[in-house]
Amino acid sequence: MVEMVSRPYASAFEKFAVGKPEILCLSADLTSSCEVDGFRDRHPDQFLSLGMAEQNMMSFAGGLGLAGFRPFIHTFGVFMYRRPYDQLMASIAYPRRKVRLMGFLPGITTPGGMTHQSIEDISVMRSIPNMTILETGDATEVESICEAADSIDGPVWCRVLRGSVPRLFDTPIKVGEMRVLSEGDDILVVTSGITTEEAMRARSALKEAGLSIRHIHLHTIKPFDHKQLLDHIGSVKHGVVTIENHVTEGGVGSLVAETMADAGVGKRLVRLGLKDTYAHGGSRAYLMRYYGLDALALVGGIEDIMGQKFGITEEDMEAARVDDVHSLVKAEAL
Amino acid sequence: MRNKKTSEEVALGIRRRVFEHSMRNNGGYLSQACSAGEQLAWLYNEELKLGDPTLPMIPKPFEGVPSADNPNYHTGAGYNGPFEPQYDRLFIAPAHYALVAYATLIEVGRMAPEGLEMFNKDGSSVEMIGAEHSPGMEVHNGTLGIGLSTGAGLAYGRKLKGEPGRTWVYMSDGEVQEGQTWEAVQAASFHGIDNLYAIMDVNQQQCDGAMDSVMEVGDLKAKFQNFGAVCVDIDGHDINAMRDAVNEPHDGKPLIILANTNPFHSMPILEERFPRLHYVRFKSEDERARMNVSIAKDLGVEPVDYSH
C-alpha cells in the first residue's frame, strides 16, 4: 500500500523559505487552499497578501523581482495565467524575473469545474519564451519543488499537488532529468503528474498480459531532454503512449509527438488526456475514468498500438486511492 | 549635470525636438509633447535623484531580447543612472510617450541628439513604443496599466531592504480605464507603500479620441483617494505646482499627482486635429507645411526643412 503524505507542500515551503529573506510568499486569497496559511501565521514578514487581484499581483511580483526578491506566488493555477496572461508575459516571462508560479489544482484534480481546472496551462507555458515548467507527481516531488524551482535563473511554472499525496519516489526532483520507472522493450509509456500513479497501478496487470513496458515519468517539461526521450523510444519495439492530466494539444503528448516528428521516428504514438474538451466538476477518480486519464484508459491505449485486447479490467489494477471530497487535509471541497 | 537649464527651458527643448522629429518624419507623438513637456522636464531636471548615466550617450543597436542565451542583455535604465539604494527609479508607464521621453533625455544631457535619429529605425534600440532596452526604460509598459503595479512591487521591495530611493511612475489618464490600475492603488495603500510616487498626464485624450467619448472615468481624484492614495490635482503646465504637490504629506500611502494638461499646449494649431491626437500623421503636404510654420513660430524656431 502506498504511503500517503498529508499536506507535503505546507511543511516543505516553510522549511525551504525560513531564513531566506529574499524569498517572499505571495497569495491571492487562497492562502489556506495553497497550504501556506501556517507560513503566513508564523512568518508574516515574508508573507504578502495581494487579494483577489491577480493582474496586479503578477506585475507587482515582477517589481519585487526587480528589487532582488524571488517571489513564490501561491494560487490556483488557472488564476495565474488565464486572466493575467498579459501581465505574466510582460512583467514576468519577458524580463526573466525569478518569480516562482506555484499553480495548485492542476488539471482535473479539483471538482471545481471549468473555472478551477487548469487543463491547458502546460500548452500555454510551453509557448512562452524563457519559461521553465515543472510538474509534481508525488509527495517527494512536492517536497522538493521549492528548491527545484528556485534553482532556475528565470520564471518557473509549477504544477503542485496538495492535500493527501502519495509517495511514489524516494529521490527529489533533479531539474532536466526524467525518471525511468521500468525498462521494458515493447511499449514506452510517458506520464507526468497524477497519471504516473495510474500507470503504476496498471503495471502488474500489463506484466501478466506478457507486455514489457518502459515507463518514464516527467517532472521537467521545459526545458526538455529530447535526446534521452529518443533513446527510450528507440528501445521499444511497438510504440509510445502518453497520458496526461491536461488537454492532448500542447502538453506532454504534443511534446513527445514533436520530438518524434523532428527526429523522423516512424513509430505509433497514442496520446491520452483531455481530448479537445473541457472537463466538469466531479471527484478525481470519476473524472479520470470519464475523460480517459486512468489506468484502464492507459491499457486501452496500449491495446490500440498492439492491435489486440488483453482482457484487463478494473479488478486487475492495483488498489486505487479514493480521496474524500471533504477531506480534512483540504481547505475546501474543491 | 542638473540645472544647467530651467525646467521651463527643458520643456521647451523637448517640444522643439519632438516637433522637428515629427516634421521630418511626417508625423509623431506631438500632442504628448504638448501635454507632458513640463512634467518630464520637472522630473528629470529637478525632482528625480538620479546618478550619472551608465550607458553610452549614443545608444547601442538592438542587442536581442532577454534569454538564457543572451547573458549580456541589459535594459535602457542605465540612462537614468545606476541602481543604487539612494537613487530614484522611474517607469514611463505609457510607453507611447517614448519619443517625448527620449527628447527629455537629450535635453537633460543623458543621451546624445543622435539617439533621436535612431527612433523607430530597423535594428535600433530607440523603439517607437519604448521597450525595456530603449533609452530610459526599465520594463515594458506598452501594455497599458501594468506600470503602477510594477512600481508598487519595486517600491515595496526597496522598502523591505531599507533603501531610501523612491520609485516614480509616469502615467497617462487613459490607463485608469484598466482595472489593474485600481488593483495597484489598493495594494499600495493596503501595504503602506508610501515610497511610491506617480504623476499622471491628465490630458483627457486616448487613441480613439477624447476620453469622455470613449469611456467616462469620473472624478479621478476622488477615486484615487477612495482606493487609498493621497492625490493632488494640479495644473500640469505649472512647474511650481509640481514642486508644491510633491511635498504633500502621504504617510503610509502612495502619492499620486494629477497633472491636468492641455493636449495642444504651445501648439494651438494641433486643435485642428482634435479629437484624433494620439499620433499625428500629416494628412497632406499642405497641412504639414501649415503646421510647420505655425508650430515653429509658437516654439520660437525656424520652420523645419524636411524637403531632403
Image (cartoon, helix red, strand yellow):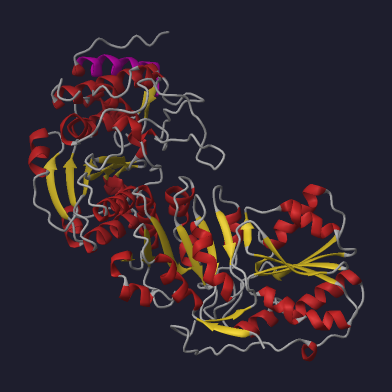
Q: Is residue A227 left or right of residue B48?
A: right
> Residue B79 location, x and y as percent?
32, 30
Q: Is residue A86 left or right of residue B9?
A: right
Q: Image height check: is A248 above or below B259?
A: below
Question: Which is nearer the eye, A46 or B226?
Answer: A46
**Is residue B294 within the magenta segment?**
yes
Looking at the image, can residue A306 be seen?
yes
Residue found at x 25% / y 30%: B271
Looking at the image, can residue B282 be seen?
no
Q: Determine which quarter of the picture holds residue B6.
A: top left
> Residue A75 location, x and y as percent?
44, 69
> Residue B155 location, x and y as percent?
27, 51
Q: Is residue A237 left or right of residue A263?
A: right
> Residue A154 location, x and y as percent?
49, 50
On the rendered image, what quadrant is the N terminus of chain A found in? Answer: bottom right
**Is residue B125 within the magenta segment?**
no
Question: Which is nearer the eye, A270 or B191?
Answer: B191
